[in-house]
Image: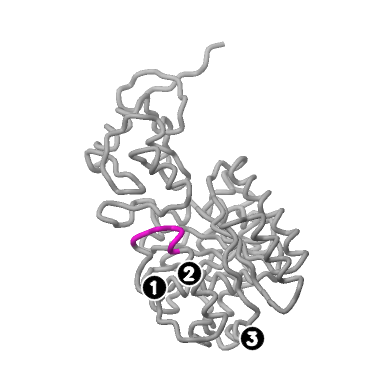
């Protein structure tokens, strides 16, 4: 029995699909391309530039080789060279012409760990706030039905993530402006009903990505605070995200939990076909006076090398900030907690290398 052939959407020729770039979904329908030339002709007909733009260096180029067009869940990525493709896979932000953001949209960072009590919400709130203070438009999404993000900042949205997923409310309309450059899409107990809705849908792991696809283009970064569970909601968050930040408490049980996170990310890549990568492991509740904290940090550094980030020290001000409905930068800007989370913001900026994420940092007072 011969292999099925496809018809090229441009030249109408018959061919066998061998590369991912040869099949593209757009506006709910599939397009087929027998060659790089036909793919480029399709791009030209779509009203774009005569040549595609490299996602990494921003240079225009002519498509010649299969590796130069890489189909991703968020769209097709283009690389002018193997060096730029390697840089993208290492975590470099996508750039457009003259350093502007490309059509792929904002960077999407999921703060995720199966284990509870590792500081996920504290990390998500303060990472988002720190990036916003750097001049970036940030959307913080609470993907946990407990609603801790809203509680931490003293807000309650009329429309929540439930309405975005189930009723199709645009995310940018449901989000609540809470600070300069920072909007929050809240959640509550209704998110459990949203999971039941997702379970009955075709392509249930990709509903969040579809709902947000063209509704958050006005943001530079989307940060998702995930629940401590292996749930369908978290699977949606990971399929939408392009990178994952894993807060890990400096204790023995938290170290064991990291293994499950790694298995989950592997499953997302292999089974759900989404190339999410680990932005880093963030040690939290670090107390240099405790041997277990020091041993846990040493173990994380030995295993994850440069992916193990600078630790977040135990700090009373970090525990107080949610009760004051403030970020750590507002509540105690000179505290160890504020300085540690500013270091995390700096690391994210350096690692991603995006021109839109290198605005002047807030002044650091001596701690």
Residue 303 on the magenta span: no
Residue at image location 46% in from the left, 68% down from the top: 346
Q: Earlier in the sequence, mark 3 or mark 1?
A: 1
Q: Earlier in the sequence, mark 1 or mark 2?
A: 1
Pointer 3 local density, CA inside 10 Å: few below 14, some 14–19, many at least 20: few
Label 1 and label 2: CA atoms lie apart by 9 Å
Residue denoted by label 2: 345
Residue 357 appears in the picture as rendered: yes
- Disc on res. 134: 1
Residue 243 image point, x, y percent: 52, 55
SS for dot 1 = loop
Above-or-below relation of 3 to 108? above
Label 3 and label 2: CA atoms lie apart by 20 Å
Pointer 2 local density, CA inside 10 Å: few below 14, some 14–19, many at least 20: many
- The answer to whether marks 1 and 2 mark residues whose Cβ atoms lie closer than 8 Å is yes
Residue 122 image point, x, y percent: 59, 74
* Drawn side of residue 63 relative to residue 230, left or right: left
Above-or-below relation of 66 to 206? above
Residue denoted by label 3: 316
SS for dot 2 = helix
């Amino acid at each position: 029995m011969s292999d099925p052939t496809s018809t090229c959407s441009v030249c109408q020729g018959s061919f066998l699909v061998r590369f991912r770039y040869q099949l593209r979904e757009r506006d709910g329908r599939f397009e087929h391309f027998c060659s790089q030339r036909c793919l480029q002709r399709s791009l030209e007909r779509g009203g774009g530039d005569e040549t595609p733009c490299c996602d990494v260096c921003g240079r225009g180029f002519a498509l010649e080789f299969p590796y130069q067009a890489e189909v991703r869940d968020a769209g097709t990525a283009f690389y002018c060279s193997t060096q730029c493709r390697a840089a993208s896979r290492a975590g470099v932000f996508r750039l457009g012409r003259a350093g502007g953001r490309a059509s792929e949209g904002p960077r999407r960072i999921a703060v995720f760990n199966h284990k509870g009590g590792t500081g996920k919400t504290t990390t998500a709130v303060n990472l988002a706030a720190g990036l916003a203070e750097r001049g970036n438009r940030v959307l913080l999404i609470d993907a946990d039905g407990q609603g801790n993000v809203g509680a931490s900042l003293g807000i309650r949205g009329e429309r929540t993530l439930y309405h975005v997923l189930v009723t199709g409310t645009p995310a940018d309309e449901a989000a609540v402006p809470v600070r300069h450059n920072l909007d929050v899409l809240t959640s509550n107990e209704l998110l459990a009903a949203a999971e039941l809705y997702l379970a009955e849908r075709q392509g249930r792991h990709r509903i969040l990505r579809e709902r947000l696809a063209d509704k958050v283009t006005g943001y530079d970064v989307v940060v998702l605070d995930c629940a401590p569970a292996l749930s369908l909601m978290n699977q949606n968050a990971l399929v939408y995200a392009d990178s994952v930040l894993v807060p890990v408490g400096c204790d023995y049980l938290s170290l064991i939990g990291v293994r499950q996170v790694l298995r989950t990310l592997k499953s997302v890549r292999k089974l759900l076909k989404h190339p999410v990568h680990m932005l880093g492991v963030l040690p939290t509740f670090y107390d240099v006076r405790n041997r277990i904290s020091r041993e846990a940090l040493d173990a994380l550094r030995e295993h994850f090398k440069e992916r193990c980030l600078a630790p977040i020290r135990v700090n009373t001000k970090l525990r107080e900030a949610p009760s004051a409905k403030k970020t750590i930068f507002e509540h105690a800007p000179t505290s160890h907690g504020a300085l540690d989370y500013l270091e995390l913001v700096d690391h994210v900026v350096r690692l991603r290398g995006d021109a839109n994420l290198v605005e002047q940092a807030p002044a650091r007072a001596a701690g």
